[in-house]
Protein backbone atom coordinates (compact mmCIF):
# COMPACT_ATOMS: atom_id res chain seq x y z
CA UNK A 1 0.00 0.00 0.00
CA UNK A 2 1.57 3.27 -1.12
CA UNK A 3 1.34 6.07 1.42
CA UNK A 4 1.03 9.78 0.80
CA UNK A 5 2.36 11.59 3.86
CA UNK A 6 1.00 15.13 4.01
CA UNK A 7 2.82 17.66 6.18
CA UNK A 8 1.22 21.12 6.65
CA UNK A 9 3.73 23.83 7.50
CA UNK A 10 3.87 27.47 8.55
CA UNK A 11 7.22 28.97 9.55
CA UNK A 12 8.77 25.62 10.45
CA UNK A 13 12.34 26.37 9.30
CA UNK A 14 13.77 25.37 12.66
CA UNK A 15 12.54 21.79 12.42
CA UNK A 16 11.34 20.90 8.93
CA UNK A 17 14.65 19.41 7.76
CA UNK A 18 14.74 17.02 10.73
CA UNK A 19 11.11 16.06 10.18
CA UNK A 20 11.60 15.29 6.50
CA UNK A 21 14.92 13.54 7.11
CA UNK A 22 13.05 11.23 9.46
CA UNK A 23 10.70 10.42 6.59
CA UNK A 24 13.63 9.76 4.26
CA UNK A 25 13.45 5.94 4.42
CA UNK A 26 9.74 6.03 3.56
CA UNK A 27 10.40 8.45 0.71
CA UNK A 28 13.19 6.23 -0.60
CA UNK A 29 10.87 3.22 -0.45
CA UNK A 30 8.45 4.93 -2.87
CA UNK A 31 6.01 6.59 -0.51
CA UNK A 32 5.06 10.21 -1.21
CA UNK A 33 6.02 13.06 1.12
CA UNK A 34 3.97 16.17 0.34
CA UNK A 35 4.64 19.43 2.17
CA UNK A 36 1.85 22.00 2.00
CA UNK A 37 2.93 25.45 3.11
CA UNK A 38 0.51 28.08 4.35
CA UNK A 39 2.59 31.16 3.63
CA UNK A 40 5.84 30.83 5.56
CA UNK A 41 8.16 33.83 5.69
CA UNK A 42 11.18 31.96 7.07
CA UNK A 43 12.18 29.90 4.03
CA UNK A 44 10.43 26.68 5.04
CA UNK A 45 9.44 25.71 1.44
CA UNK A 46 13.03 26.09 0.18
CA UNK A 47 14.33 23.91 2.99
CA UNK A 48 11.65 21.28 2.35
CA UNK A 49 11.92 21.06 -1.42
CA UNK A 50 15.04 18.82 -1.68
CA UNK A 51 13.57 16.33 0.79
CA UNK A 52 9.96 16.05 -0.37
CA UNK A 53 8.11 14.58 -3.33
CA UNK A 54 6.30 17.90 -3.74
CA UNK A 55 6.04 21.25 -1.98
CA UNK A 56 2.72 23.04 -2.46
CA UNK A 57 1.27 26.32 -1.28
CA UNK A 58 -2.29 26.68 -0.02
CA UNK A 59 -4.38 29.15 1.97
CA UNK A 60 -3.31 29.16 5.62
CA UNK A 61 -5.01 26.73 7.96
CA UNK A 62 -4.28 23.06 8.60
CA UNK A 63 -7.60 21.83 7.18
CA UNK A 64 -7.16 23.71 3.92
CA UNK A 65 -3.51 22.77 3.63
CA UNK A 66 -4.16 19.09 4.28
CA UNK A 67 -7.05 19.00 1.83
CA UNK A 68 -4.77 20.56 -0.78
CA UNK A 69 -2.17 17.89 -0.11
CA UNK A 70 -4.78 15.16 -0.36
CA UNK A 71 -5.92 16.53 -3.73
CA UNK A 72 -2.35 16.19 -5.02
CA UNK A 73 -1.67 12.80 -3.41
CA UNK A 74 -1.47 9.61 -5.45
CA UNK A 75 -1.21 7.05 -2.66
CA UNK A 76 -3.84 4.53 -1.62
CA UNK A 77 -3.59 5.78 1.95
CA UNK A 78 -3.15 9.29 3.34
CA UNK A 79 -1.13 10.07 6.47
CA UNK A 80 -1.54 13.52 8.01
CA UNK A 81 1.57 14.42 9.95
CA UNK A 82 2.15 17.62 11.90
CA UNK A 83 5.48 19.26 11.15
CA UNK A 84 6.67 18.75 14.74
CA UNK A 85 5.67 15.07 14.94
CA UNK A 86 7.70 11.93 14.16
CA UNK A 87 6.24 8.63 13.05
CA UNK A 88 7.25 5.45 14.90
CA UNK A 89 9.62 2.92 13.38
CA UNK A 90 7.94 0.58 10.92
CA UNK A 91 5.06 3.00 10.39
CA UNK A 92 4.36 1.94 6.79
CA UNK A 93 3.87 -1.71 7.70
CA UNK A 94 1.77 -0.86 10.73
CA UNK A 95 -0.48 1.41 8.67
CA UNK A 96 -0.81 -1.14 5.89
CA UNK A 97 -1.85 -3.86 8.32
CA UNK A 98 -4.29 -1.57 10.13
CA UNK A 99 -5.94 -0.41 6.90
CA UNK A 100 -6.36 -4.00 5.88
CA UNK A 101 -8.91 -4.20 8.72
CA UNK A 102 -10.22 -0.65 9.15
CA UNK A 103 -10.94 2.41 7.05
CA UNK A 104 -8.80 4.69 9.20
CA UNK A 105 -6.72 4.93 12.33
CA UNK A 106 -4.12 6.73 14.40
CA UNK A 107 -1.06 6.08 16.55
CA UNK A 108 -0.68 6.54 20.25
CA UNK A 109 1.26 9.70 21.03
CA UNK A 110 4.08 10.67 23.34
CA UNK A 111 4.63 14.36 24.03
CA UNK A 112 8.30 15.35 24.20
CA UNK A 113 8.74 18.32 26.52
CA UNK A 114 10.30 19.57 29.74
CA UNK A 115 7.37 19.03 32.09
CA UNK A 116 7.01 15.50 33.54
CA UNK A 117 3.22 15.91 33.50
CA UNK A 118 3.31 15.67 29.69
CA UNK A 119 3.74 11.90 30.00
CA UNK A 120 0.40 11.80 31.79
CA UNK A 121 -1.19 14.14 29.25
CA UNK A 122 -0.13 11.85 26.41
CA UNK A 123 -1.43 8.76 28.20
CA UNK A 124 -4.80 10.43 28.82
CA UNK A 125 -5.03 11.54 25.19
CA UNK A 126 -4.48 7.96 24.08
CA UNK A 127 -7.03 6.58 26.53
CA UNK A 128 -9.64 9.18 25.60
CA UNK A 129 -9.13 8.43 21.92
CA UNK A 130 -9.65 4.71 22.45
CA UNK A 131 -12.84 5.28 24.39
CA UNK A 132 -14.38 7.91 22.10
CA UNK A 133 -13.01 6.88 18.71
CA UNK A 134 -11.89 10.50 18.17
CA UNK A 135 -8.31 11.15 17.07
CA UNK A 136 -6.22 14.31 17.29
CA UNK A 137 -3.79 15.59 14.71
CA UNK A 138 -0.86 14.89 17.04
CA UNK A 139 -1.65 11.19 16.71
CA UNK A 140 -0.82 11.11 12.97
CA UNK A 141 -4.21 10.22 11.52
CA UNK A 142 -4.10 7.84 8.56
CA UNK A 143 -6.96 6.87 6.26
CA UNK A 144 -7.71 5.01 3.07
CA UNK A 145 -8.01 7.47 0.21
CA UNK A 146 -11.45 6.20 -0.75
CA UNK A 147 -12.70 6.70 2.82
CA UNK A 148 -11.28 10.22 3.01
CA UNK A 149 -13.00 11.14 -0.24
CA UNK A 150 -16.24 9.48 0.85
CA UNK A 151 -16.57 11.76 3.89
CA UNK A 152 -15.57 14.93 2.05
CA UNK A 153 -12.14 15.35 3.62
CA UNK A 154 -11.39 17.84 6.34
CA UNK A 155 -14.03 20.47 7.11
CA UNK A 156 -13.12 24.02 6.16
CA UNK A 157 -12.77 25.36 9.70
CA UNK A 158 -9.82 26.92 11.57
CA UNK A 159 -9.86 24.67 14.65
CA UNK A 160 -11.03 21.20 15.73
CA UNK A 161 -10.76 19.96 12.15
CA UNK A 162 -9.28 16.67 13.37
CA UNK A 163 -12.21 16.08 15.72
CA UNK A 164 -14.72 16.80 12.97
CA UNK A 165 -12.91 14.50 10.52
CA UNK A 166 -12.93 11.76 13.16
CA UNK A 167 -16.68 12.15 13.59
CA UNK A 168 -17.17 11.82 9.85
CA UNK A 169 -14.94 8.77 9.59
CA UNK A 170 -16.63 7.09 12.55
CA UNK A 171 -19.70 6.81 10.32
CA UNK A 172 -17.62 4.30 8.34
CA UNK A 173 -16.26 2.51 11.40
CA UNK A 174 -14.15 2.98 14.51
CA UNK A 175 -10.46 3.76 14.10
CA UNK A 176 -7.55 1.39 14.38
CA UNK A 177 -5.83 2.61 17.56
CA UNK A 178 -2.18 1.55 17.30
CA UNK A 179 0.01 1.15 20.38
CA UNK A 180 3.12 2.33 18.52
CA UNK A 181 3.80 5.92 19.49
CA UNK A 182 4.25 8.98 17.35
CA UNK A 183 6.39 11.55 19.14
CA UNK A 184 5.16 15.13 19.05
CA UNK A 185 6.80 18.29 20.32
CA UNK A 186 5.70 19.70 23.65
CA UNK A 187 6.60 23.25 22.57
CA UNK A 188 3.02 24.45 22.96
CA UNK A 189 2.90 23.23 26.55
CA UNK A 190 6.43 24.41 27.34
CA UNK A 191 5.76 27.90 25.99
CA UNK A 192 2.46 28.48 27.77
CA UNK A 193 2.93 26.30 30.81
CA UNK A 194 1.58 22.74 30.94
CA UNK A 195 -1.31 23.24 33.38
CA UNK A 196 -2.50 26.40 31.71
CA UNK A 197 -2.42 24.67 28.33
CA UNK A 198 -4.22 21.58 29.60
CA UNK A 199 -7.03 23.69 31.05
CA UNK A 200 -7.28 25.73 27.85
CA UNK A 201 -7.52 22.62 25.67
CA UNK A 202 -10.22 21.05 27.79
CA UNK A 203 -12.25 24.27 27.85
CA UNK A 204 -11.99 24.60 24.08
CA UNK A 205 -13.09 21.01 23.54
CA UNK A 206 -16.00 21.41 25.96
CA UNK A 207 -17.15 24.61 24.28
CA UNK A 208 -16.89 22.97 20.88
CA UNK A 209 -19.02 20.05 22.05
CA UNK A 210 -21.55 22.60 23.34
CA UNK A 211 -21.80 24.02 19.83
CA UNK A 212 -19.53 27.07 19.98
CA UNK A 213 -18.28 27.62 16.41
CA UNK A 214 -14.61 26.93 15.74
CA UNK A 215 -14.26 30.44 14.33
CA UNK A 216 -15.02 31.85 17.80
CA UNK A 217 -12.63 29.50 19.57
CA UNK A 218 -9.58 30.02 17.39
CA UNK A 219 -8.51 33.34 18.92
CA UNK A 220 -8.40 31.74 22.38
CA UNK A 221 -6.33 28.87 21.01
CA UNK A 222 -3.81 31.11 19.27
CA UNK A 223 -3.23 33.36 22.24
CA UNK A 224 -0.64 36.14 21.91
CA UNK A 225 1.30 36.27 18.60
CA UNK A 226 4.35 34.02 18.58
CA UNK A 227 7.11 33.30 16.13
CA UNK A 228 7.32 29.91 14.45
CA UNK A 229 4.85 27.07 14.73
CA UNK A 230 1.82 26.01 12.78
CA UNK A 231 -1.49 27.59 12.28
CA UNK A 232 -4.09 26.26 14.71
CA UNK A 233 -5.34 22.74 14.39
CA UNK A 234 -7.19 20.39 16.70
CA UNK A 235 -6.95 21.28 20.35
CA UNK A 236 -5.04 18.42 21.89
Image: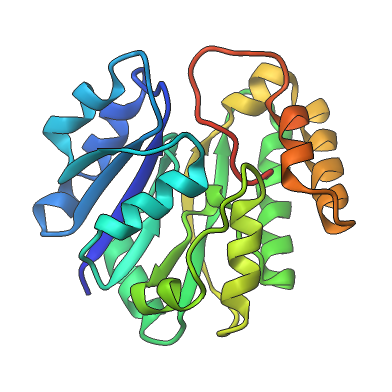
Q: Is residue 78 above or below residue 109?
A: below
Q: Is residue 101 above or below residue 167?
A: below
* Residue 35, quarter of picture: top left
- Nearer-the-camera pick, 209 or 150: 150
- Residue 113, percent across and down? 59, 28
Does residue 81 appear in the picture of this structure? Answer: no
- Residue 119, percent across and down? 66, 41
Does residue 52 appear in the picture of this structure? Answer: yes
Where is the C terminus found, in terms of image quarters? top right
Question: Is 119 placed left or right of 141 in the picture?
Answer: right
Question: Is 129 placed left or right of 89 in the picture?
Answer: right
* Residue 41, quarter of picture: top left
Where is the N terminus found, in terms of image quarters? bottom left
- Residue 108, percent across and down? 55, 58
Colouring used for the render: rainbow
> What is the tally of numbered marks visible in this picture?
0
Q: Is residue 41 above or below residue 183?
A: above
Question: Is 27 placed left or right of 135 in the picture?
Answer: left
* Residue 97, quarter of picture: bottom left
- Nearer-the-camera pick, 101 or 224: 224
- Residue 231, percent across and down? 54, 31
User: Residue at position x 64%, y 13% from top?
Assistant: 225
User: Residue at position x 46%, y 79% from top?
Assistant: 150
- Nearer-the-camera pick, 22 or 165: 165
Amino acid sequence: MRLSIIVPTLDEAAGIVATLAGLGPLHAAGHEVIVVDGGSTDGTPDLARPLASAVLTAPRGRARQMNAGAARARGEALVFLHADTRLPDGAAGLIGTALGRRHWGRFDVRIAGRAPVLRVVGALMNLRSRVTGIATGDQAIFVRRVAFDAVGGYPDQPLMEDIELSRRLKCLGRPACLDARAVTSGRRWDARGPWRTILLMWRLRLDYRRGVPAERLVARYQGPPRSGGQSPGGAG
